[in-house]
Each structure stands twice: as C-alpha cells, then as structure tokens.
Image (tube, grey):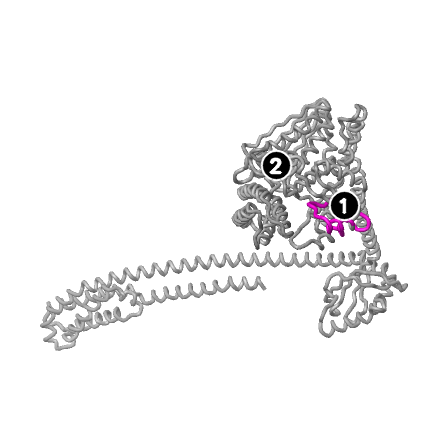
Amino acid sequence: MAGVLMILLAVLPLIQMNSEVREQIDALATANSDSRQWSLAQSDVELLVLLNEMAKAAAAPSAPLSDLRTRFNVFYSRVNSLSASPMLHSVREDQEVTDALERLRTYLDETVLLIDGEDSVLRNAVPQLMEKTEAVRADVRRINLSGIKILSEEAEAQRSSVINTLTLVSFLSLAFFAVLVFVVVLLIHFYRRAQERAIEESLVRSRLASIISTSLDAVVSVNRQGMIIDFNGAAEQIFGYSREEAIGQKMEEMIVPEHLRQAHQNGMDRYRKTGEKHVIGKGRVQLEARRKNGEIFPVELSISTAESEEGEIFVSFLRDISRRLATEQGLITARDKAIAGEKAKADLIAVMSHEMRTPLNGMLGTLELIDPEKLSAKNKEYFEIIRASGKLLLHHVDDVLEISRAESGRIEIARVPFSLPALVRELVDSQRGVAEHRGNTLSRAVETLERDYALGDPVRIRQILLNLIGNAIKFTRNGSILVEASRLAGSDMVEFRVTDTGVGIAAKDRERIFEDFVTLDSSFSRSVGGTGLGLAIVRRLVKAMDGEVGLESTSGFGSSFWVRLPLPSPDGEIPSARPSNTVKDLVEDIGPVPPMKILVVEDNKINRVIVRELLEQDGHAVDEAFDGRQGVEFTRKNAYDLVLMDISMPVMDGIEATRAIRDSEPAGTYLPIVALTANAIPSEMDRFLAAGLNDILIKPISRKGLREILARFSAKVHLHTDDEPGDDSGAPDSLVDHAHLTELANALGAEKINRLIQNFIDEMQETIAYVEKCAKAGKSEPGMREKVHYSTGSSALLGAEALRIALASLETRLAEGLDCDPADGEKLKDIWAATATELKVHTRLS
C-alpha cells in the first residue's frame, strides 16, 4: 500500500506538468498563426501605401480617387485590428502604444468624413490629408517597434517557461523512476523481512514448545469449559498423570483439591459472566493442589489468558513449593534460635556485669581502704598485684560492655568545646610512665592551624586514643611512640595519628584486627595479653562520630594508626579556662564536698562497709539499710541529702523502693537518689532513670567515683574564690549541662534557646536579689516559696544543676517553715554568679 501511494504521488505531478507543457505549446502555435508581428509591420506598410496614393491624387487632379479610398479603408481596418485583436492585448497594455493608438483613432475619425465625402472636397483636402497622415506615421512606427519588442519578450518568456517545464518534467520523470526503484527495493526488503519473521516465529514456537516441555514448572492449559488442552512434562512429574491421561479431562476433577473445587467453579462462572478477575492475571498466588495419589501439597500458581483458534484459553504455571516452605520454616526456626541466642548473650552480659562487678566492688573497694604505705615491702607488692589484676579484669569487663552498648546503637556522642593540645598533652603525660616502663619514649606533636579548640566528645576521643596508645605501648619495646594531632587545612577534619616502632602488622591481618576478639597469633602478642576488643571499640566509636580509622604498617618495622574526625572550631569567644573543667576535675581540685547526710541502701555487707568507710572518711554522716523496704522507711523518718540505692536486693529491689519514695515525697521536695549497680547494660540504665533515679554509679565503687556523684548533687559545691587556690578563669562546666542545652538547641533552634537563656538570666537576677534581701533580714516572706519553686523549675529546664539543687534545698527549708539563713543567701549568690557566667559562655559558643 505504501509503495502504491508513493507511485501515485509521483505520477500526479507528471500529469500536471504534461498538461502545462501542452498548453504552452498550443499557445506558441496560436501566436504563430495570428502572425502578430506581421500585423504590426503591415500597419506601417499600409500607411506608406496610403501616403503613396495620396501623392498620386495630388499629382494628377483628374485621376480617380477610388484607390485612395481603398487604401484608407485597408489602413483603417489594420488600425482596428491593432486596437481589437486579442493577440495584441499585451501590446496595448503599453502606455505609449495606447497613446499612439488613441491619436491614430482621432486621425481616422477626422479623416473618414473626407474619405466618405464628395470627390471634389476630398481632392481639395488631399494636401492637408497628406500632412496629417505624415504626422501619424511616427505613431504607427512607435506602435510597430514597441509591439515587436513586447512580442519578442513574450516569446522569449514562453520559450523559457517551456524549457523550465520540460526540465521539471525530466527531473520528475527521473524521480519517478527512482521512486519506482526504491519501491521495488522496499518490496523486496519487506518480502525478505516477512520470510525472516516467519522463520523466527517458527523458531519461537519451537523454542516455546521446548521450554514448556522441559520447564521445571508445571504448565497446564485449559479452555473456557475447563477442559485440559495441554499438559507438559513437569506437570506429569508433579501431579502423577501422563499427558494422554490429562488431555481432554476436567482440570478441577484432576488437580484441584475437593475443599477448593466449589470456590474454583464459582470463580470461573463469575469470570465467564462478568469478566471479573480474582486470580487470573494477578501474579503469583499460593494455593493447594492434589496429586494423582490424593496427596495435597502447596503450590505457587500464576494464571494468564491467551487467544487461540478455538477461542480464549487459560494458561496456568504451577510450582511445587513443598521443599521451599520446609526450608523457610527451617530458617524461621533458625532465626528464632538466633534471637534466643542473642537474648541469652544479652542476659549473660547482664549477669556477668552484675556477678563480676559485685565481687570486684568488694575487692577494689576494700583496697581503697588500705593504706599501702603502712604495708611491708612484700605485702605492698602483693597489694599492687591484686589492685592491678582487679583493674585489668574490670577493664576487660568494661570492653565487653562497651561492645554490647555499641551493638545496641546506644553510643551517645557529646558536642562540647575542648582544647586539642591540652587533650593530647594530658594523654601523653598520663601514659608516659607506662611507656617508659617498657623502655619506650612517648612524645607528642600538635598542629592546630591556630584553631586550638574543637567541638566534639573529648571523653570518647580520649577513649579512642588511649586504646591506640595502649596498643602501641604493648607491642613496642625499647622503641619510640609518637602521638600526633593535626587539623587538615581547608576543612573541619582533625587527624590523630599514633605511630610506633614496634612489631608491626602483616598485610593479611590489617583488616581483621578491627574485628571483635581478634588478637594476632604471635608470641609477643600473647605475652601482652588482651581481649582483642580495643580496636573493635575504636572502630565503633569512630563510626559513631562520622569519622574514619585506618593504619599503615610493615611487619617488623612498626605501625601507624590514624583517625580522622569532623571537629569544627567553636564559634565565638573561648573562655580562658582549663581545657578540661568537668565535674571530675572539680572533684580533684576541691577534694571532699562539705558533709552530707547520706542513706546507703545495699544488701551486700561488704559493699555497705566499703561505701560507709569511704563516705565517713570524707566526713559524711551515713545510715545503712539492708533492703529496699527498710530504705523506704528510713526516708520517711529521716531527712537525707542523698540516697545511694542498690538495685538487686531481696524483699524490695531498688526500682520498687525508688518508686515508693517518689510516691511518698511531700509536695515541693525532691530527694536525689543514685543507683548503685553492677549492671551496666544501656537498656537497664534507661529503666533505672525512668523509675525516678537521678543518676547511676556503676560498681566497683571508688573514692573518686563517690566524690564525683556527691559533687554533682551537693548544693554546697564551692567555686574557687580569691581566697582559694585554683583557676579563676571562670565557672566549671559542671554548673551547666551543656549536652542538655545542645539537645534543646537541636530541637528548638539555637536562636530560641539563647533567647530563653537570656530571659532566664534576667528573671534569676531578680529572684537572687530578692532571696539575698530576705536572707540578710533572716526571715521569709509570703509567696517566697512559690517564687523559689518557679526558679527551681526553670533551672532544671535549662540544665543549671548546681543552682537547681541550691534552690531546691532552700525550697525545702521554706516548706518546713524555717526562716532564711544569711549563709544560704551568700551561697546562692556565689552559685548564681558562676552559673550566669557559664550560661553566657554557652550562648557565645552555640
């Protein structure tokens, strides 16, 4: 059809061109028959003849005038021919010709009267006629010349048109021939394609038949009446029927289980009537089928429709999934066992945490009570061995717990300002003695690009570097270890590098040393021992801080471990305080906090003795309760500054006891309760805090750990003043919970938090001035308790912990009906001054 259309499109222009050529040739022929140029030239001849006759008439007065009249009439006719002939229409369009013809008509109209008049009149007028005739001779000549020129141009144009038309006809004829050739080639191509398609379809049908016959899935085709029209080899194997048995039989009676037949019939009836599809074309569906022997088994089924010579047919693909379901069930069972194993591991870690930390608490805590200087040299040596072994065992337990915490995704990363040079210096100084003990030199190099301070988690960074430095010391003897920190130019990345000249690491071990419980199998490594968790913890901590860790090493020539962490510089002014001004540093500076009234609730006698001795040595008053119920009774009868609550106790555990204390607290009071536990699992810690506990002290308990907790909850923590030695650069971070403020800033926005802090500062200035005035007067005023209670809530909200505790203590005093003490006013004033400074520093850094 396309070829015929192309031929027609090519033929039509040829027919049209042929018609135009014929018309132009006819026009040329017509123009020749009219002899237009001859007519124009003849008018000039006729005028000359007329003038000749007039000359004869003038020379022979007696001569007849009939020839003159005849020549005039001929000329008159010739002029009329020029004026009216269609063939001369184009000549008459010329303005000069038109004007000349007009003058000739005027001449003829004036002369015709004389020509048709009497002979005597005509004879007398011959001289004048000759003059007039001679005068129009120029017009006749002008018409003749202009006409010849115009007709010549027309003839030339007609010849050019005919040539162009003939050229176009020749081109179209050539194009027509090319189209015919193209159509022939196209038809040949289509013919060959049709042959190839026929061959391909034949091959496809052959392959399809081969695929169906060899398919591992059963393929069953049925017609609209449900009769089987095809049954492949896989269907024979799956269902147990031969193809000859199945063809022509009702499918539902052969392979559909009895309990599904009615549903199958209803579905087919619905489809035949309405065309509604529930299973057809819906993809894979899991059902049951029946074998020849009556066995019911699970199948995966997919049904589609197709058209055949007999009409619509249904093609079903069925797969026996008995083995797959059995495998899936096995996997589910294995998964359940794995989950149970993970739970058992978590339970084991929890039990290990408690059962190992409890005796460690007794051992290490008792050692805290012994003065080594009073021991003999040998006993002192034994003492140091026991203490070192206990600390090593505690370190191993902590490593396992750290891995458990990392796997649960509960590693919390702080974001506080700290000094990079100070952190590296502190680490190197603290480990130099250990390094020298093994004959090593430990040095440091820090390059901060004049950006000494960074925002990050100094505790976690210290933990990472301690692991790397510890490894370097363990695997290096009589060598050197270099700890480097450098800020990468043009970025916030800081690279830490620990390089040693130790035994090095083989290439095959460089990746696996970051895996859990991996220790390199060499005599030297075995001599230093270890759980193989240090580098695994490093990897997890670095990942939690969005950093990278790696190493460069050559076996026998040392190693270089590097860690890259994003640690941007804090914005704003950095206080000229100590680089590590946390609660721990504060405790070391000021020693024991002022005496407090403390209740220790602990069922383990050894633990009670240790905690009591440590507290009493620092001057605190201590009461003891041996279970949770007794602890609750003590709090109802006595006033305490702090409760140290064991968790695992008989009769009533620490969780229940804490809830009972919280339920019975008088309005406006709040007793700080700290958990004593060996269970350091993150999920358990969350449960403790949710029960109302304020903090957690993990066993084994040390003097330093106790002092940290007491400093955190004591309302009598003193800051350095001009009368006390120490750093007077500003308040310590313990006054304000920077991590809490950072979390609020992330949730509400830094601008809003800074605005809230400023409002808080303005309100607290008024409250502190009011309290100071009342304290100086030694009395309380109506509404004072409510004002203090409001400020206590605001302090807690913004993490001003020391201020909150001081205000809460004052609120308790007011609730008991006691007057203000001038000492309370001075203490609160000092705490507020330091807290306000710290809050202002935070707003500049945020």
User: In the structure shown, which secondary structural element does the residue marked by tag 2 occupy?
Assistant: loop
Say whether residue 314 is left or right of residue 580: right
Q: Which residue is mark 2?
A: 581
The quarter of the displayed image where residue 480 is located: top right
Instruction: Give the residue drawn at x 76%, y 52%.
Output: 656
- The one nearer the camera, 712 or 320, is 712
Q: Is residue 128 above or below residue 735?
A: below
Residue 90, how many percent across, how many down? 30, 65
Say whether residue 834 is left or right of residue 310: left
Q: What's the residue type where badge 2 is placed? A: Asn
Q: CA distance from mark 1 to mark 2?
A: 32 Å
The quarter of the displayed image where residue 387 is located: top right
Residue 533, how many percent across, how many down? 75, 37
Picture disc at residue 601: 1
Q: Which residues are magenta?
A: 630-658
| 792 inside magenta stretch | no
Which corner quadrant holds the C terminus? top right
Label 1 with label 2: CB-CB less than 8 Å: no
Q: Of all residues shown, which one is farthest toward the right? A: 293
User: In the structure shown, which secondary structural element does the residue marked by tag 1 occupy?
Assistant: strand
Labels in figure, total: 2
Q: What's the residue type where badge 1 is placed? A: Val
Instruction: Give the residue drawn at x 52%, y 49%.
Output: 766
First in sequence: mark 1 or mark 2? 2
Instruction: Give the residue drawn at x 55%, y 45%.
Output: 776
